[in-house]
Each structure stands twice: as structure tokens, then as C-alpha cells.
């Protein structure tokens, strides 16, 4: 059944008319409740993780499904003061090596948006013939969830803060790691901080077992919100700004965001396995990387990032900034005018 649905979906996203029709129907069906929930959540306390993590109906603010993840397209449109469709496929995180998602090749769009020159190189080698716009870390373009006064007030309350990003589950796939081992490491650094914030992905924030383990160790649970929440990046930006030090147990997009916002980062070396909830899901998950070259290049780049952040230190090294520049492309950040000009030029 899932193979059939995947086939149907692939056919739909190849058709401008079918995408327009499908998105129009979804907007009619989900629009009222989605907009009501977004308005409600935009006023919730940053620490109300249980409410922020609850499921949201999908709503296509942008034509391409992936662009609606984590509020990325919304942040870019607000930054550019642009209300139309981006007519682009946004790589919604740091993609390493030569892995190119299947959908990136299927959508009828005019451009690809990504982080860096390094990623652009792999896209071109992989046969992507569309214009590729490099814009650096997306978190730059997101508005702060907390204004300056709110940030100062919250920081005064929580004091010196350690922000933790555990490996996270995705739909139908659970991240499995030794949480107690990770907590033991967190506790070994606790005396240097007044507060430990654990930022859980929305699926894990709904998992009572995971939440209890961290809360029982005197950690404060936070989340940037559901993946369809347009305020996701904004919340994440404020959470990182509240931190003095950040740690995780796997390579992820958050690392570049932390360094861009001048927060040191450390990767705690730990085995993380991803367990699918069915044989079909396991096959689908593994098929994202369907060639040896994709696996090898991804592993090489992952290892480079792990090596760069393998030392626990409270300052950011120049070598770490160089690695983040390579994969997140901080020098590629565009002004409002330049970003809008690039979109207009590509359209022209």
C-alpha cells in the first residue's frame, strides 16, 4: 500500500495542475484549524513543550512539500517581503556527501536552494541542471521568537545555560541510543551551568519515556515545535541565543546554526541506531542512500564534522568555523535585496 501511495505521490508532484489541485483541497480542508493553531502557538511560552509538540495538520504555505518544514519558506518570504510561491526546492537541512533526495529531482520547479558551495558541487555532479542558489544557514533569515527584552528577561531567570540536542526520531523511524550514558555525560558538566535545556524534536517530546528520563535528571525540556509550525526556526534561534554552550550526540543541522550564532558546540561520541517501525519503512529509510558512493561520501563528511567538534571546549576554534563555512556556507548569506534579486534574475 505504501509503495502504491509513494508512486501516486511521485506522479502528482510531477504535474503542476495536480499539485495545484491537491494543495488547494488541502488548504480548504486544513486551513481554518491550521491558522488557528499557528496563532495560538505563536503566543505560547517557549517552555511549553507539550503544547508546542502536538501534531499540526499539513498546510502548504509553499507549493513544494519540503519547503513547508520548519518554517523555512515562511522565513525566507518574510525576509524578502515576498508573498508569492518560491518556485524552488529548499534542501531543508545540511545534506552531506552526494546524497540527493528523490523528490528533489521530481518537483517541477525553477531552482534549488541550499547552504554552501560544497553542497552545490555535489548537486551538479549528481546531474541537477537547475540554477542552484546558495544562501548559507537558514536560521539567519528567521525572526527572533523572543524580542531583545524578552531574551534578556528569560536569560536572567535561567542563568548560565547548557543546551542539549539529542539525536531525534523521524516519522516511522525511532532514534535509539543510550540515553542514560548521554545523561551521565550531561551531568558531568552540570556544575558549570545553572540550567540544562534539552531540545527535543517534536516526536520525541511526545514520548513520555524519553521526556521522563531527562526530566528526572533535572533537565528542562524544550522544543522548537512541530515540523509544520512556521515559528520553528524562530524558536530554535531564541533557544540557541539563550545558551552559553551547546552539545549533541550526532551530526545535524543544529551544529552550523549554533556556530553561526556564536555558541560553542561539542559532539558527544555515541552509537545511534535508527529503527523503523516496519520492514517497508526500513527499506524506504535505507533507500535514501542507494549507492555505495553516496554512503561513502556522506560518511566522510560526517566524520570531518565529528572530528572538528570532538573536543569539549567553551570557545569556538577557527578550524570549527572553517568546517561550518564549508558545509553551512556562512559567507553565502544574502541581504534582502540581493536574495530577492537572485530570485527575480532566475525567473527572468
Image (cartoon, rainbow, N blue to C red):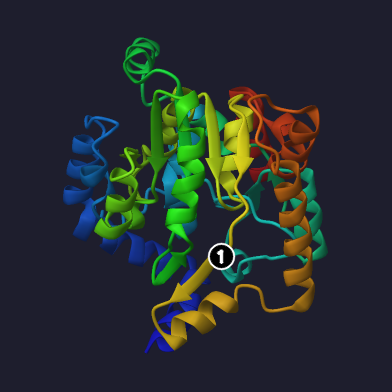
Q: Quadrant of residue 155?
A: top left
Residue tagged 1: 107
17 or 212, nearer to the observer? 212
In-image side of 88 versus 333 (left or right): left
Question: Residue visible at 35% across and 21% down?
Answer: 158
The answer to whether residue 255 is seen in the rendering is yes
135 or 218, nearer to the observer? 218
Q: Position of residue 251 (x, y in %)?
A: 62, 51
- Element under label 1? loop
In this rendering, the answer to whether 4 lies above or below 318 is below
The answer to whether residue 243 is seen in the rendering is no
Q: How many marks?
A: 1
Which quarter of the rendering shows the C terminus?
top right
In-image side of 287 versus 210 (left or right): right
Q: Position of residue 148 (x, y in %)?
A: 40, 12
Question: Residue visible at 42% across and 30% down?
Answer: 239
Q: Position of residue 42 (x, y in %)?
A: 26, 33
Question: Residue visible at 35% across and 10% down?
Answer: 149
Amino acid at each position: 500500500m505504501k509503495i502504491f501511495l509513494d508512486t501516486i505521490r511521485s506522479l502528482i508532484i510531477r504535474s503542476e495542475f495536480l499539485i495545484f489541485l491537491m494543495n488547494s483541497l488541502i488548504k480548504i480542508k486544513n486551513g481554518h484549524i491550521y491558522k488557528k493553531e499557528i496563532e495560538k502557538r505563536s503566543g505560547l511560552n517557549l517552555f511549553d513543550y507539550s503544547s508546542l509538540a502536538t501534531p499540526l495538520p499539513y498546510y502548504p504555505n509553499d507549493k513544494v512539500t519540503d519547503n513547508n518544514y520548519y518554517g523555512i519558506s515562511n522565513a525566507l518570504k518574510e525576509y524578502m517581503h515576498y508573498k508569492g510561491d518560491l518556485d524552488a526546492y529548499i534542501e531543508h537541512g545540511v545534506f552531506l556527501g552526494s546524497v540527493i533526495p528523490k523528490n528533489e529531482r521530481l518537483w517541477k520547479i525553477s531552482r534549488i536552494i541550499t547552504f554552501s558551495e560544497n553542497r552545490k558541487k555535489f548537486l551538479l555532479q549528481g546531474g541537477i541542471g537547475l540554477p542552484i542558489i546558495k544562501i548559507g544557514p537558514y536560521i539567519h533569515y528567521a525572526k527572533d521568537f523572543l524580542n531583545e527584552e524578552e531574551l534578556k528577561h528569560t536569560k536572567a531567570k535561567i542563568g548560565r545555560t547548557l543546551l542539549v540536542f539529542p539525536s531525534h526520531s523521524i516519522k516511522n523511524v525511532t532514534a535509539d541510543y543510550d540515553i542514560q550514558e548521554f545523561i551521565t555525560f550531561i551531568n558531568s558538566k552540570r556544575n558549570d551551568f545553572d540550567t540544562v535545556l534539552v531540545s527535543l524534536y517534536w516526536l520525541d517530546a511526545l514520548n513520555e519515556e524519553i521526556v521522563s528520563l531527562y526530566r528526572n535528571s533535572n533537565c528542562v525540556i524544550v522544543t522548537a515545535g512541530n515540523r509544520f509550525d512556521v515559528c520553528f526556526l524562530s524558536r530554535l534561534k531564541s533557544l540557541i541565543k539563550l545558551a552559553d554552550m551547546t552539545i549533541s550526540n550526532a551530526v545535524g543541522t543544529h551544529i552550523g546554526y549554533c556556530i553561526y550564532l556564536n555558541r560553542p558546540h561539542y559532539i558527544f561520541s555515541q552509537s545511534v541506531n535508527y529503527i523503523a517501525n516496519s520492514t517497508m519503512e526500513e527499506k524506504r529509510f535505507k533507500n535514501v542512500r542507494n549507492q555505495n558512493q553516496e554512503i561513502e561520501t556522506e560518511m566522510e563528511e560526517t566524520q570531518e564534522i565529528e572530528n572538528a567538534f570532538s573536543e569539549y571546549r567553551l570557545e569556538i576554534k577557527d578550524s570549527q568555523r572553517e568546517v561550518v563555512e564549508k558545509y553551512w556556507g556562512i559567507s553565502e548569506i544574502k541581504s534582502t535585496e540581493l536574495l530577492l534579486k537572485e530570485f527575480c534574475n532566475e525567473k527572468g
